[in-house]
Image: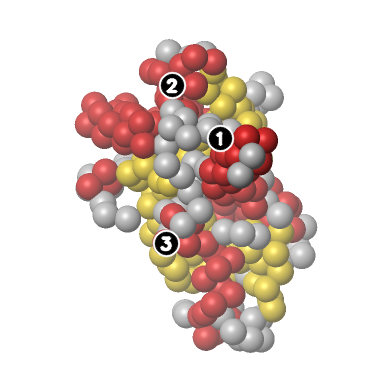
C-alpha cells in the first residue's frame, strides 16, 4: 500500500468513525463545549398549555421554559430558546440542533433507542376526553368514532395501537389541536390534561370531560446519545433541585399540583 493510499484509507476510517458518532469527533464532551461556548441551547415545544406558551407580555414561559432557564443559570451560561414542534423533539436532539430538550417528552423504550434521557423531572397524564353524553369508557368504545390527536406523541401511538377502527385525525402541534376542538372540527380527543383544560377554557359550548386516563407519563430531559458528562450533571441537578423543593415550586406554579414524591427514584 502506498503512503497516499494509506493516508486515504486512514481518512476514510476517520470519517466513518465521525459519522458513527453523529458527525462529532471521538471523545467529544458536550458539557465542556457548552461551558466553553457560554451558552445552552434548549429545545422547547412551544404552544403547550402550562408547559410552554407565550404570556400576556409576549414572552415565552411555562414550567418547561422556566425549568430550562434555571438549568442555564446554574450552569453559569446564557440561555438560548430553540422553539420547535412536538414532532421535531427527538430529531432536534439527534441532529444536535439543540444541546438538550425540555419539552414534556415522555420517556419510552422506543425514544431511548434514539436519544438519552435524564431521570424524570416532571409527569403528565394523557386522557381520552369527549362530550359528557358520549359513552366512552375504554379504547374499544372509540371504534367508528373520530378522535383527534397531536402527531408524534405517546397519545398518537397509543390510540393508533389500541383503538383499531377509530378514525384518527392528526394535528401538527397542541395549539392546532386546541383550535380544531374549539372550532368544532373535533369533539373527541386524546391529549394531556393541561391541553384539555385549555380547550375547555376556549370552548363556547359544553365542556369536554375525561372519559378515561390512558397513562401517567414520566417526562425526561433528552440529550444526544453518549454524552455521559452532560447526563450526569443533569441527573444530579434534577435530584438536587427536587430535594430542595425548587423543581416542585416551578412545576406547581403553573400546574397547581405537586410532583410525585417518588419522582426521581422512578425506574424508566
Q: Nearer the viewer, mark 3 or mark 1?
A: 1
> Mark 2 or mark 3, which has the lower sequence index?
2
Are the residues at dot 2 and dot 3 in contact (C-beta closer than 8 Å)?
no
Q: How is the image coloured?
A: secondary structure
Q: Position of residue 205 (x, y in %)?
A: 68, 60
Can you say which quadrant of the picture contains the N terminus? Answer: top right
Q: Position of residue 86 (x, y in %)?
A: 62, 49
Return the mark for residue 154.
none
Q: Position of residue 139 (x, y in %)?
A: 51, 80
Kindly identify the residue that appears in the image at 57 percent across and 44 percent down: 13
Judge the density around disc 3: few (<14), some (14-19), many (≥20) Cα neighbours within 10 Å: few
Are the residues at dot 3 and dot 1 in contact (C-beta closer than 8 Å)?
no
Are the residues at dot 2 and dot 1 in contact (C-beta closer than 8 Å)?
no
Q: Is residue 204 left or right of residue 157?
A: right
Residue 111 appearing in the image? yes
Label 2, label 1: how far apart the Cα atoms are = 14 Å
Q: Nearer the viewer, mark 2 or mark 1?
A: 1
- Which secondary structure lies at badge 3? helix
Return the mark for residue 24.
1
Of 256 and 172, the residue lying toward us: 172
> Mark 2 or mark 1, which has the lower sequence index?
1
Judge the density around disc 1: few (<14), some (14-19), many (≥20) Cα neighbours within 10 Å: some
User: Which quarter of the picture shows residue 15?
Assistant: top right
Q: Which residue is mark 3?
A: 109
Q: Which residue is mark 2?
A: 32
- Which secondary structure lies at badge 2? helix
Q: Nearer the viewer, mark 2 or mark 3?
A: 2
Amino acid at each position: 500500500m502506498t503512503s497516499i493510499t494509506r493516508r486515504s484509507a486512514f481518512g476514510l476510517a476517520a470519517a466513518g468513525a465521525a459519522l458513527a458518532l453523529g458527525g462529532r469527533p471521538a471523545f467529544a464532551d458536550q458539557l465542556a463545549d457548552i461551558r466553553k461556548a457560554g451558552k445552552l441551547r434548549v429545545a422547547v415545544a412551544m404552544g403547550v398549555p402550562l408547559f410552554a406558551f407565550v404570556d400576556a407580555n409576549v414572552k415565552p414561559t411555562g414550567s418547561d421554559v422556566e425549568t430550562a432557564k434555571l438549568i442555564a443559570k446554574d450552569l453559569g451560561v446564557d440561555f438560548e430558546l430553540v422553539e420547535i414542534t412536538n414532532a421535531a423533539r427527538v430529531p432536534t436532539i439527534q441532529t444536535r440542533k439543540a444541546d438538550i430538550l425540555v419539552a414534556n417528552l415522555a420517556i419510552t423504550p422506543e425514544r431511548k433507542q434514539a436519544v438519552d434521557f435524564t431521570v424524570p423531572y416532571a409527569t403528565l397524564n394523557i386522557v381520552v376526553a369527549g362530550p359528557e353524553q358520549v359513552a366512552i369508557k375504554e379504547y374499544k368504545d372509540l371504534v367508528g368514532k373520530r378522535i383527534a390527536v397531536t402527531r408524534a406523541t405517546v397519545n398518537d401511538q397509543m390510540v393508533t395501537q389500541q383503538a383499531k377502527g377509530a378514525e384518527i385525525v392528526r394535528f401538527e402541534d397542541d395549539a392546532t389541536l386546541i383550535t380544531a376542538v374549539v372550532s368544532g372540527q373535533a369533539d373527541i380527543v386524546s391529549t394531556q390534561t393541561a391541553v384539555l383544560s385549555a380547550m375547555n377554557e376556549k370552548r363556547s359550548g359544553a365542556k369536554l370531560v375525561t372519559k378515561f386516563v390512558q397513562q401517567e407519563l414520566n417526562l425526561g430531559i433528552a440529550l444526544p446519545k453518549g454524552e455521559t458528562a452532560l447526563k450526569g450533571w443533569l441527573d444530579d441537578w434534577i435530584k438536587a433541585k427536587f430535594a430542595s423543593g425548587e423543581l416542585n415550586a416551578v412545576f406547581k406554579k403553573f400546574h397547581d399540583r405537586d410532583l410525585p414524591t417518588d419522582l426521581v427514584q422512578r425506574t424508566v
